[in-house]
Image: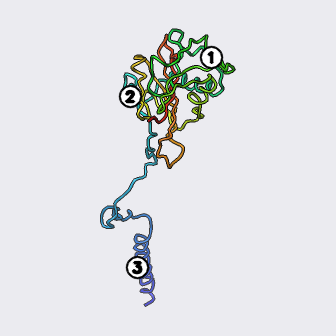
Amino acid sequence: MRRMTPLLSAAILALLLSGCGSASNSNGATDAPKAFPSAGSSLGIEATVNTGSETPAPTELIPSETGPSDSSNVPDARLEEAAREVVEYLRERDLTSLTPLIDSELGLRFSPYSHINAETDLVFQADALPDFKDAKKMVWGTADGSGEPIELSFRDYYEKFVYNKDFGNAPNISFNKILGTGNSAFNGKEVYPDASYVEFHYPGFDKTLDGMDWQSLVLVFVPKNDEWKLAAIVHGQWTI
Protein backbone atom coordinates (compact mmCIF):
# COMPACT_ATOMS: atom_id res chain seq x y z
CA MET A 1 0.00 0.00 0.00
CA ARG A 2 2.86 2.34 0.85
CA ARG A 3 4.45 1.54 -2.55
CA MET A 4 1.27 2.54 -4.31
CA THR A 5 1.02 5.86 -2.48
CA PRO A 6 3.74 7.57 -4.53
CA LEU A 7 2.27 6.18 -7.71
CA LEU A 8 -1.18 7.34 -6.74
CA SER A 9 0.14 10.78 -5.83
CA ALA A 10 1.91 11.03 -9.19
CA ALA A 11 -1.26 10.06 -11.03
CA ILE A 12 -3.30 12.65 -9.16
CA LEU A 13 -0.66 15.31 -9.85
CA ALA A 14 -0.65 14.49 -13.58
CA LEU A 15 -4.42 14.72 -13.66
CA LEU A 16 -4.38 18.12 -11.98
CA LEU A 17 -1.76 19.46 -14.40
CA SER A 18 -3.83 18.28 -17.35
CA GLY A 19 -6.88 20.16 -16.03
CA CYS A 20 -4.91 23.39 -15.64
CA GLY A 21 -3.75 23.20 -19.25
CA SER A 22 -7.34 22.97 -20.49
CA ALA A 23 -8.40 25.98 -18.40
CA SER A 24 -5.53 28.02 -19.84
CA ASN A 25 -6.64 27.32 -23.42
CA SER A 26 -10.24 28.30 -22.71
CA ASN A 27 -9.52 31.61 -20.94
CA GLY A 28 -6.02 32.70 -22.01
CA ALA A 29 -4.79 34.85 -24.91
CA THR A 30 -2.65 32.15 -26.44
CA ASP A 31 -5.48 30.78 -28.57
CA ALA A 32 -6.47 32.51 -31.82
CA PRO A 33 -9.36 35.01 -31.20
CA LYS A 34 -12.79 33.95 -32.26
CA ALA A 35 -14.22 35.59 -35.37
CA PHE A 36 -16.90 38.23 -34.57
CA PRO A 37 -19.87 38.68 -36.91
CA SER A 38 -19.39 41.48 -39.45
CA ALA A 39 -21.46 44.64 -39.09
CA GLY A 40 -23.26 43.91 -42.32
CA SER A 41 -24.00 40.24 -41.74
CA SER A 42 -25.73 38.61 -38.79
CA LEU A 43 -26.34 41.88 -36.88
CA GLY A 44 -28.21 43.43 -39.78
CA ILE A 45 -26.31 46.75 -39.52
CA GLU A 46 -24.63 48.38 -42.49
CA ALA A 47 -21.04 49.31 -41.83
CA THR A 48 -20.06 52.98 -42.10
CA VAL A 49 -16.65 54.54 -42.60
CA ASN A 50 -15.72 58.00 -41.40
CA THR A 51 -12.83 59.22 -43.50
CA GLY A 52 -12.65 62.59 -41.79
CA SER A 53 -12.43 64.35 -45.18
CA GLU A 54 -15.98 65.37 -46.00
CA THR A 55 -16.17 67.91 -48.84
CA PRO A 56 -17.76 71.19 -47.70
CA ALA A 57 -20.63 72.70 -49.66
CA PRO A 58 -19.25 74.84 -52.50
CA THR A 59 -19.45 78.60 -52.25
CA GLU A 60 -22.06 79.99 -54.59
CA LEU A 61 -20.47 82.01 -57.37
CA ILE A 62 -22.27 84.49 -59.58
CA PRO A 63 -21.46 83.28 -63.10
CA SER A 64 -20.17 85.51 -65.85
CA GLU A 65 -22.17 85.93 -69.04
CA THR A 66 -19.04 86.85 -70.96
CA GLY A 67 -16.44 85.20 -68.80
CA PRO A 68 -12.83 84.35 -69.57
CA SER A 69 -12.03 82.02 -72.44
CA ASP A 70 -11.56 79.05 -70.09
CA SER A 71 -15.22 79.33 -69.05
CA SER A 72 -14.18 79.89 -65.46
CA ASN A 73 -16.50 81.68 -63.06
CA VAL A 74 -13.53 83.23 -61.31
CA PRO A 75 -13.34 86.92 -62.24
CA ASP A 76 -10.26 88.54 -63.72
CA ALA A 77 -8.17 89.48 -60.69
CA ARG A 78 -7.15 92.78 -62.29
CA LEU A 79 -10.76 93.63 -63.10
CA GLU A 80 -11.87 92.92 -59.56
CA GLU A 81 -9.00 94.93 -58.13
CA ALA A 82 -9.80 97.89 -60.38
CA ALA A 83 -13.50 97.76 -59.49
CA ARG A 84 -12.86 97.68 -55.76
CA GLU A 85 -10.39 100.53 -56.09
CA VAL A 86 -12.92 102.64 -57.97
CA VAL A 87 -15.66 101.95 -55.43
CA GLU A 88 -13.37 102.99 -52.61
CA TYR A 89 -12.56 106.27 -54.35
CA LEU A 90 -16.24 106.88 -55.03
CA ARG A 91 -17.04 106.28 -51.38
CA GLU A 92 -14.39 108.78 -50.35
CA ARG A 93 -15.36 111.20 -53.17
CA ASP A 94 -11.70 111.15 -54.13
CA LEU A 95 -11.86 112.18 -57.78
CA THR A 96 -8.15 112.99 -57.83
CA SER A 97 -7.25 109.36 -57.18
CA LEU A 98 -9.99 108.22 -59.56
CA THR A 99 -8.60 110.21 -62.49
CA PRO A 100 -5.70 107.85 -63.46
CA LEU A 101 -8.14 104.93 -63.66
CA ILE A 102 -10.30 106.61 -66.33
CA ASP A 103 -9.77 105.77 -69.99
CA SER A 104 -7.89 108.69 -71.51
CA GLU A 105 -9.64 108.44 -74.89
CA LEU A 106 -13.23 107.53 -74.02
CA GLY A 107 -13.49 109.64 -70.91
CA LEU A 108 -15.97 108.87 -68.11
CA ARG A 109 -19.68 108.49 -68.84
CA PHE A 110 -22.38 108.98 -66.20
CA SER A 111 -25.62 107.10 -66.84
CA PRO A 112 -28.53 107.59 -64.39
CA TYR A 113 -30.15 104.31 -65.46
CA SER A 114 -29.08 100.86 -66.60
CA HIS A 115 -29.89 101.61 -70.23
CA ILE A 116 -27.05 103.81 -71.43
CA ASN A 117 -28.14 106.65 -73.69
CA ALA A 118 -25.25 107.44 -75.99
CA GLU A 119 -26.90 110.71 -77.06
CA THR A 120 -27.87 112.30 -73.75
CA ASP A 121 -25.44 110.89 -71.17
CA LEU A 122 -22.77 113.30 -70.01
CA VAL A 123 -19.17 112.26 -70.67
CA PHE A 124 -16.17 113.97 -69.08
CA GLN A 125 -12.50 113.65 -69.89
CA ALA A 126 -10.30 112.47 -67.05
CA ASP A 127 -8.70 115.88 -66.61
CA ALA A 128 -12.03 117.72 -66.72
CA LEU A 129 -14.22 116.02 -64.13
CA PRO A 130 -16.88 118.20 -62.50
CA ASP A 131 -16.34 119.64 -59.04
CA PHE A 132 -18.42 118.92 -55.96
CA LYS A 133 -18.25 122.60 -55.09
CA ASP A 134 -19.70 123.68 -58.42
CA ALA A 135 -23.38 124.54 -57.96
CA LYS A 136 -23.99 124.74 -61.70
CA LYS A 137 -26.81 122.47 -62.82
CA MET A 138 -26.45 120.17 -65.79
CA VAL A 139 -28.92 117.92 -67.62
CA TRP A 140 -27.89 114.32 -67.04
CA GLY A 141 -30.69 112.62 -68.89
CA THR A 142 -34.44 112.07 -68.62
CA ALA A 143 -36.15 111.02 -65.39
CA ASP A 144 -37.88 107.67 -65.47
CA GLY A 145 -41.65 107.91 -65.26
CA SER A 146 -42.06 111.68 -65.47
CA GLY A 147 -39.92 112.19 -68.56
CA GLU A 148 -38.61 115.41 -67.06
CA PRO A 149 -34.96 116.34 -67.55
CA ILE A 150 -32.62 115.32 -64.75
CA GLU A 151 -31.21 118.77 -64.03
CA LEU A 152 -28.88 118.63 -61.06
CA SER A 153 -25.55 119.90 -59.83
CA PHE A 154 -22.77 117.35 -59.85
CA ARG A 155 -23.01 116.92 -56.08
CA ASP A 156 -26.76 116.30 -56.21
CA TYR A 157 -26.43 113.91 -59.14
CA TYR A 158 -23.64 112.04 -57.36
CA GLU A 159 -25.71 111.61 -54.22
CA LYS A 160 -28.73 110.34 -56.15
CA PHE A 161 -27.30 108.43 -59.12
CA VAL A 162 -23.72 107.46 -58.24
CA TYR A 163 -23.08 106.64 -54.60
CA ASN A 164 -26.55 106.81 -53.06
CA LYS A 165 -25.89 103.57 -51.13
CA ASP A 166 -22.76 102.16 -49.56
CA PHE A 167 -21.92 100.02 -52.56
CA GLY A 168 -18.52 99.20 -51.13
CA ASN A 169 -20.36 96.92 -48.71
CA ALA A 170 -22.93 95.60 -51.18
CA PRO A 171 -23.93 91.98 -50.43
CA ASN A 172 -23.69 90.93 -54.08
CA ILE A 173 -20.95 91.57 -56.61
CA SER A 174 -21.26 90.20 -60.12
CA PHE A 175 -18.86 90.15 -63.04
CA ASN A 176 -20.26 90.55 -66.56
CA LYS A 177 -23.70 89.56 -65.34
CA ILE A 178 -26.45 91.98 -64.34
CA LEU A 179 -28.36 91.09 -61.19
CA GLY A 180 -30.63 94.13 -61.00
CA THR A 181 -33.21 93.85 -63.76
CA GLY A 182 -36.28 95.85 -64.65
CA ASN A 183 -37.84 97.57 -67.61
CA SER A 184 -34.59 99.39 -68.40
CA ALA A 185 -32.19 96.78 -69.79
CA PHE A 186 -28.46 97.21 -69.41
CA ASN A 187 -26.81 97.74 -72.80
CA GLY A 188 -23.21 98.33 -71.80
CA LYS A 189 -21.84 95.74 -74.22
CA GLU A 190 -23.59 97.46 -77.12
CA VAL A 191 -22.02 100.80 -76.32
CA TYR A 192 -18.66 99.32 -75.32
CA PRO A 193 -18.26 96.01 -77.23
CA ASP A 194 -14.90 95.10 -75.69
CA ALA A 195 -15.86 96.08 -72.17
CA SER A 196 -16.26 94.10 -68.98
CA TYR A 197 -18.43 95.34 -66.16
CA VAL A 198 -18.80 94.84 -62.43
CA GLU A 199 -22.06 95.29 -60.56
CA PHE A 200 -22.28 96.11 -56.85
CA HIS A 201 -25.83 95.17 -55.98
CA TYR A 202 -28.32 95.51 -53.15
CA PRO A 203 -31.28 93.16 -53.79
CA GLY A 204 -33.63 95.31 -51.71
CA PHE A 205 -34.18 96.97 -48.37
CA ASP A 206 -37.91 96.79 -47.58
CA LYS A 207 -39.22 93.22 -47.56
CA THR A 208 -42.75 94.42 -48.28
CA LEU A 209 -41.60 95.69 -51.69
CA ASP A 210 -40.49 92.24 -52.89
CA GLY A 211 -37.14 93.49 -54.15
CA MET A 212 -38.52 96.36 -56.22
CA ASP A 213 -36.31 98.76 -54.27
CA TRP A 214 -33.06 97.16 -55.44
CA GLN A 215 -30.08 99.42 -56.15
CA SER A 216 -26.95 98.83 -58.20
CA LEU A 217 -23.73 100.52 -59.12
CA VAL A 218 -22.33 99.20 -62.40
CA LEU A 219 -18.77 100.04 -63.39
CA VAL A 220 -17.86 99.59 -67.05
CA PHE A 221 -14.21 98.97 -67.89
CA VAL A 222 -12.40 98.75 -71.21
CA PRO A 223 -9.07 96.97 -71.80
CA LYS A 224 -6.05 99.20 -72.31
CA ASN A 225 -2.46 97.90 -72.39
CA ASP A 226 -3.09 94.94 -70.08
CA GLU A 227 -5.09 97.13 -67.73
CA TRP A 228 -8.76 97.85 -67.15
CA LYS A 229 -9.74 101.49 -67.53
CA LEU A 230 -12.99 102.97 -66.27
CA ALA A 231 -15.31 104.15 -69.05
CA ALA A 232 -18.73 104.49 -67.41
CA ILE A 233 -20.48 104.72 -64.07
CA VAL A 234 -24.01 103.37 -64.40
CA HIS A 235 -26.74 103.64 -61.79
CA GLY A 236 -29.26 100.82 -61.62
CA GLN A 237 -32.70 100.80 -60.01
CA TRP A 238 -36.23 99.61 -60.69
CA THR A 239 -37.78 101.60 -63.53
CA ILE A 240 -41.37 101.94 -64.70
Picture coordinates of residue 171, whole percent (x, y): 53, 38
Q: Point out the image quarter for the C terminus.
A: top left
Q: CA distance from mark 3 to mark 1?
A: 115 Å
**Nearer-N-terminus badge (1/2):** 2
Numbered disc 1: secondary structure: loop
Going by the picture, which residue comes out furthest to the bottom? Answer: 1
Q: The residue under label 2 is which amino acid type?
A: Glu
Q: Point out the image quarter for the N terminus.
A: bottom left
Which disc number belongs to residue 65?
2
Which sits in the foreground, 39 or 13?
Answer: 39
Q: Give neighbour class at mark 2: few <14, some 14-19, many 20+ (Cα, 10 Å).
A: few
Which sits in the foreground, 104 or 133?
Answer: 133
Q: CA distance from mark 1 to mark 2?
A: 33 Å
Q: Give neighbour class at mark 1: few <14, some 14-19, many 20+ (Cα, 10 Å).
A: some
Q: Please give the residue where the numbered disc 1 appears in the rendered image.
A: 130
Judge from the rendering whether residue 84 lies leftward or rightward of residue 13; answer left or right. right
Q: Quadrant of residue 83?
A: top right
Nearest-to-viewer mark from 3 and 1? 1
Picture coordinates of residue 89, whole percent (x, y): 62, 24
Q: Residue at x 64, y 19 (%)?
A: 136
Query: Pointers 1 and 2 in contact (CB under 8 A)?
Result: no
Q: Give neighbour class at mark 3: few <14, some 14-19, many 20+ (Cα, 10 Å).
A: few
Nearest-to-viewer mark from 1 and 2? 1
Q: The residue under label 3 is which amino acid type?
A: Leu
Judge from the rendering whether residue 126 lies leftward or rightward of residue 3; answer left or right. right
Numbered disc 2: secondary structure: loop
Going by the picture, which residue comes out furthest to the top? Answer: 105
Q: Please give the residue where the numbered disc 3 appears in the rendered image.
A: 15
Picture coordinates of residue 85, whole percent (x, y): 59, 24
Q: The residue under label 1 is which amino acid type?
A: Pro
